[in-house]
Image: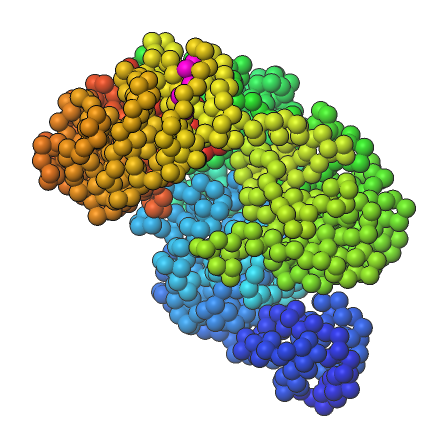
Amino acid sequence: MDAKARNCLLQHREALEKDIKTSYIMDHMISDGFLTISEEEKVRNEPTQQQRAAMLIKMILKKDNDSYISFYNALLHEGYKDLAALLHDGIPVVSSSSGKDSVSGITSYVRTVLCEGGVPQRPVVFVTRKKLVNAIQQKLSKLKGEPGWVTIHGMAGCGKSVLAAEAVRDHSLLEDCFPGGVHWVSVGKQDKSGLLMKLQNLCTRLDQDESFSQRLPLNIEEAKDRLRILMLRKHPRSLLILDDVWDSWVLKAFDNQCQILLTTRDKSVTDSVMGPKYVVPVESSLGKEKGLEILSLFVNMKKADLPEQAHSIIKECKGSPLVVSLIGALLRDFPNRWEYYLKQLQNKQFKRIRKSSSYDYEALDEAMSISVEMLREDIKYYYTDLSILQKDVKVPTKVLCILWDMETEEVEDILQEFVNKSLLFCDRKGKSFRYYLHDLQVDFLTEKNCSQLQDLHKKIITQFQRYHQPHTLSLDQEDCMYWYNFLAYHMASAKMHKELCALMFSLDWIKAKTELVGPAHLIHEFVEYRHILDEKDCAVSENFQEFLSLNGHLLGRQPFPNIVQLGLCEPETSEVYQQAKLQAKQEVDNGMLYLEWINKKNITNLSRLVVRPHTDAVYHACFSEDGQRIASCGADKTLQVFKAETGEKLLEIKAHEDEVLCCAFSTDDRFIATCSVDKKVKIWNSVTGELVHTYDEHSEQVNCCHFTNSSHHLLLATGSSDCFLKLWDLNQKECRNTMFGHTNSVNHCRFSPDDKLLASCSSDGTLKLWDVTSANERKSFNVKQFFLNSEDPQEDMEVIVKCCLWFADGARIMVAAKNKIFLWNIDSCSKVADCRGHLSWVHGVKFSPDGSSFLTSSDDQTIRLWETKKVCKNSAIMLKQEVDVVFQENEVMVLAVDHIRRLQLINGKTGQIDYLTEAQVSCCCLSPHLQYIAFGDENGTIKILELVNNRIFQSRIRHKKTVWHIQFTADEKTLISSSDDSAIQVWNWQLEEYVFLQAHQETVKDFRLLKNSRLLSWSFDGTVKVWNIITGKIEKDFVCHQGTVLSCDISHDATKFSSTSADKTAKIWSFDLLLPLHELRGHNGCVRCSAFSMDSTLLATGDDNGEIRIWNVSNGELLHLCAPLSEEGAATHGGWVTDLCFSPDGKMLISAGGYIKWWNVVTGESSQTFYTNGTNLKKIHVSPDFKTYVTVDNLGILYILQTLE
């Protein structure tokens, strides 16, 4: 470091040590490469902030001039403008040094690596830009094999992509830094579905032998995980090149510990990702000499021999590589037209591509227009047809064969002429050629041919209809993906509204498209074309959109669910249900199995209004103070305002450059505040949408904002991932106060009703109260402690406190963390209600001003408006999963216990509910002839209720602990029960006689009645016992397993029984022998259930991995393995298999787990799946004719299913 810089630093050392916060300064210096990780650690080890600053300055004093400059720039970036001004005079002059040129020879090794990675070849006409190439290579070398980002940024058309490709065309760089290879991805402007397609293609390229997975990832998160695994395990130390990145959110999909080189017009795109970052800026102009060199190569002349017009053309083109290349391509074919093309550029007053164009080239549209005009007359109108193509979309040759009704060879000949004139690009990778336009060319064509666009779109639809039926497209057709993605777009653009509605309202199209690409793109289309679809039938449009939205989590899974069965679960008035019912009836005639959910009418939708104003996740929604309007914001970067009553849109504002995380109305409803991942806070006029203020003092994303409750002195509070809260006065340009104290991201903040306190909650697991006047911390509550138990030590538990809400009295606060809601009164908390409906993470809850309703906003793209009273009332009718069912002729009677232990008798066909008793019921059962019910409680008491007259009988002798199982004998005179006390009680309740079966050493898991007054019981002690219930004596004692016996089943000929255990085995026993007939091995998890077929020849077993095995009872051989593990290792049954039952003819098997499945016993294949709203089913009750099924999910929802006939 030179003396001037050193003296300046020493002179202002004291001021710097006193004020700077080192952590963010060091981040910048590490990113610049002037501070090491070990040096950063040494600074962090200092005990105080001032000592840390002193240590950092001490290190800088020992470094060079570049370190001084890096430190100075870091101060500016972090807002220390005054301190940076002190160091300005000491900034040293750094001499530039070009360094050695890299090895320019392209070896066979380089060619192979780049070809395999899809790196574009050098353009036909290529000029070197060594200085820029060297700069990129130096930045790439700085990654040193560690994850990081090198960004090449500059204006469109400046040659960024060519430079990126040239930088990796270097043997030593590839061998030393990226031995794992290079992988090129053309990104472009994308929505979520487009990005998913890019990721799917990349994963396919990286896993060509399909050694990791045989199917494409179905969503961006899955694709990100797949990419991470592939790069880590299959392609370690490789470089990923992302070409033409537009949006920061796109990079998050690649933010998985990779080395990445990217090209972009906006260098701020990497602000949203972590890791070291290096930037190489590219000038928009080649410069006169480079431009002349390009022209000389195109026309095959020496630079010195170029005519004078060449210099003028470079001047008119402003040195743009893209424009110079377009003109050069024209001159290559017509080398005598220098003067002609120069005059065209100088004199033609072409309309700009678009006034708001982001491409800042005054000559570009002129150059492109000249190129089109020079096409042969017989192919010129074919180029006009390309006006209907979308940006960044590569179109298979087959699509254009259909459009032009030509053979492939004819089409390729025409397109090659366009490619030769630089009017079209060709991707020659893959089985067939794919063609695409540059964004500028798309803009130019759509502007030039705007009056013809509707007819051009109509033409491609008409041609498509000649060749294809929409739902019959298959993957073996090279053009199928194009039609699935863009058929609706072409119909909407052609204003073929009738055809668009027929397509979008077709269950066949929904099925075909979602099975191939998942539901996300289809949901986007319903949002995009809602104004057209609503013209046809608003209700039908809402039916289909809601069906897709509410079943998106199912439609994205593999194996793909039966969409007709999903449709049968919709309300009977829904168009989706009616189409599904029609299809189901036709398929039932051909032997297909379908289920009707006959009690679904009893499942009420608690939402009063569901709106989808956003095209991505909704992060926050809030009421205006008068309750008439709702504001919402989300991942699509917009602020939306709509009417609370109808959902009618009032405002739509492109609010931020990145995801908008929170919004808030001011007390007087004049303003709306928004905050974002882009670190900015903005204030908007709530009526006009005009921007009033922008604040940008937070150093990380801003997560929350809230106005004071009084409009006399309006303050805004914001909380950020930088751990700070800030208070803003709308009359001032800068922050009024900053509040320090949280040790992790601040997620939410709320002023108390009197505005004296500010509550904040954080990812550090705490809720804090702050004094608004002094900005001091008043109190802190540790929410984390309420989630701790003996299995989860505090240091391993992460509790993110999501949001908080004050009550009107200012004495209580409601806090949401993980899956619980706490009502806080300093030292007490309680859960108040459950709201079911959202399919994904709920980000926020907000009450209306009068408290009668509240909003929830979610990742499922919906905002739901709930009625508070309905929700609270509904939360009282959740059923426990232990129910008893009796099937009698045409009736289904269900006895159930709700979550507050009340008994309900439900008529499954009519839906009528009788509330029988309000005792604290732990288990219950119905007598075979429906004359009595029995129930046990937690105190060990057993009671019998006679249904005719409500007379109650109570056992004189109680169990010592909670009663868990209870059953009548066939004559209804005796009741058998078991509990945690390891005893089984036999109670002849009419004679008041008792027999106790006591021999098990641990809790009885369950029991089954046998013939001739016998009973089979099994226990946690690993034994199975056969009892005489009259004498109370053990007749057989089987020591079955080392671990718990989890289940038993008795063969229908009553000669054998099965046992399953936590020891991962099942066994088949004869009642006559004390040794097993067969030990069934092969399960890799606890074997939780088993069932014999009606003829006793087959046994089915199910385990905790979702696996079902069917065995031959006579020899113990395995016949079928059902529900094997999926590729990712997740159980395909959605969890444990908990219950099994064969059909009377033994040809079908039903299983319960995460959902219900029916299996073909002969083939071992799945016949049907019914997805319940919740999961973790415990038991499935099946009617004797195998046509009616009853179960309860973990949300307490009752399902009575009937086969469709």
- Residue 594 visible here: no
Q: How many marks?
A: 0
Most frequent secondary structure within the magenta stretch: strand
Residue at the far right: name it: 712
Quarter of the image holding residue 1050? Answer: top left
Q: Is residue 822 magenta?
A: no
Please identify the quadrant where the N terminus is shown. Answer: bottom right
Is residue 882 placed above or below 1041 in the rendered structure?
A: above
Is residue 329 placed above or below 1007 in the rendered structure?
A: below
Residue closer to the observer: 893 or 715: 893
Residue closer to the observer: 825 or 652: 825
Q: Name the side, left or right, on which 73 lies relative to 514.
A: right
Q: Position of residue 640 (x, y in %)?
A: 71, 37
* Magenta-drawn segment: 943-947
Residue at image x 86%, y 44%? 710
- Residue 951 visible here: yes
Is residue 26 placed above or below 464 in the rendered structure?
A: below
Q: Position of residue 356 (x, y in %)?
A: 73, 44
Please identify the quadrant where the C terminus is shown. Answer: top left
Residue at image x 61%, y 51%? 801
Q: Position of residue 1100 (x, y in %)?
A: 22, 32
Is residue 478 placed above or below 507 in the rendered structure?
A: below
Residue closer to the observer: 414 or 17: 17
Quarter of the image holding residue 1008? Answer: top left
Quarter of the image holding residue 700? Answer: bottom right
Q: Position of residue 928 (x, y in %)?
A: 32, 16
Residue closer to the observer: 979 or 648: 979
